[in-house]
């Protein structure tokens, strides 16, 4: 039986705070920059939270977020604001994948390098990357996912996997909560950078199936996601990246 995600117990205000905090932390970690976005499904609604097109990612606050339906229509939000150009990327994934409650899309160049060279695909080389043992697909079309047809094409490439890269473009990370999408975004880039650095030394030896099975046996995802979330939230509050009074 499917267990409810922790996200289902959040108030809308808490979800807004978490999306804003996740975005700010990804910017602070130099994973996201002036472009990219984090979305969160609103429990009990065919709708999700996402930032506006022009709002600076490093200044995002809960009240800046829009409520959009899966077609990308704005249902609620600041007057006169527009949804990001790639709102369909989020909407189509959330429509299709009921196990996904949060999506992050960013453009980390060194990670995306693995889509630009022949014969060197991104592989699982770090233990926390066992999240992607099912595969790390690459979406061949580098275009902005600016409409429903392009969003549905991304959904087909994603399949049952938990992340993909868009060739010469960026990354898409899917997870069961905002906390988990932060966790996975950080680990996705960590894994890519570990492989990038190892390849500069010599031939890379990815984790074997036995290695990954051994780690999965002892890995407690919920506990790990919470541990990493608390670590980054506390650091972000200390640095002033996230407001101290946010109840997250």
Image (cartoon, rainbow, N blue to C red):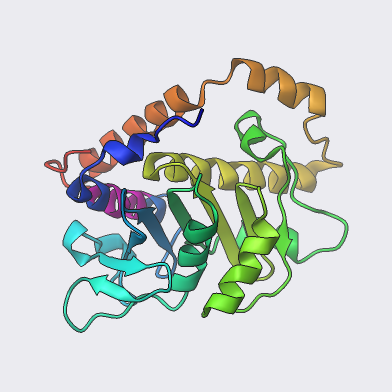
Query: Which secondary structure class fits the magenta region best?
Result: helix
Q: Is residue 201 magenta?
A: no
Question: Which residue is at a point 82% across and 40% down the rendered structure image?
Answer: 204
Q: Is residue 144 visible?
A: no
Q: From the viewer's perspective, is 154 left or right of 97?
A: right
Residues rendered magenta in the picture: 17-25
Q: From the viewer's perspective, is 232 left or right of 171?
A: left
- Residue placed furthest toward the top: 218
Q: Is residue 234 above or below residue 106?
A: above
Question: Which residue is at a point 73% across and 63% down the rendered structure image?
Answer: 115
Q: Is residue 228 above or below residue 8?
A: above
Q: Quadrant of the C terminus?
A: top left
Q: From the viewer's perspective, is 115 left or right of 92?
A: right
Q: Is residue 222 above or below residue 144?
A: above
Q: Is residue 18 magenta?
A: yes
Residue 107, image x, y percentages: 54, 64
Question: Which residue is at a point 73% across and 58% down the rendered structure image?
Answer: 114
């Amino acid at each position: 039986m499917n267990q409810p995600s922790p996200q289902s117990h959040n108030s809308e205000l808490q979800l807004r705070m978490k999306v804003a905090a996740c975005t700010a932390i990804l910017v602070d970690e130099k994973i996201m920059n002036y472009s990219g976005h984090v979305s969160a499904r609103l429990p009990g609604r065919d709708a999700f939270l996402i930032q506006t097109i022009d709002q600076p990612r490093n200044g995002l606050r809960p009240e800046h977020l829009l409520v959009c339906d899966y077609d990308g229509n704005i249902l609620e939000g600041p007057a006169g604001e527009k949804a990001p150009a790639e709102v369909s990327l989020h909407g189509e994934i959330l429509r299709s994948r009921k196990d996904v409650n949060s999506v992050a899309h960013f453009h980390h160049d060194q990670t995306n390098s693995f889509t630009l060279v022949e014969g060197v695909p991104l592989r699982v080389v770090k233990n926390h990357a066992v999240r992607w043992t099912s595969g790390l697909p690459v979406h061949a079309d580098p275009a902005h996912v600016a409409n429903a047809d392009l969003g549905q094409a991304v959904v087909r490439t994603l399949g049952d996997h938990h992340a993909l890269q868009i060739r010469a473009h960026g990354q898409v990370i899917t997870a069961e909560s905002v906390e988990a999408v932060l966790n996975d975004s950080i680990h996705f880039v960590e894994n890519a950078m570990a492989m990038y650095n190892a390849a500069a030394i010599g031939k890379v030896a990815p984790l074997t199936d036995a290695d990954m099975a051994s780690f999965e046996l002892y890995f407690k995802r919920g506990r790990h996601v919470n541990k990493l979330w608390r670590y980054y939230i506390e650091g972000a509050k200390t640095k002033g990246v996230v407001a101290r009074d946010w109840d997250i």
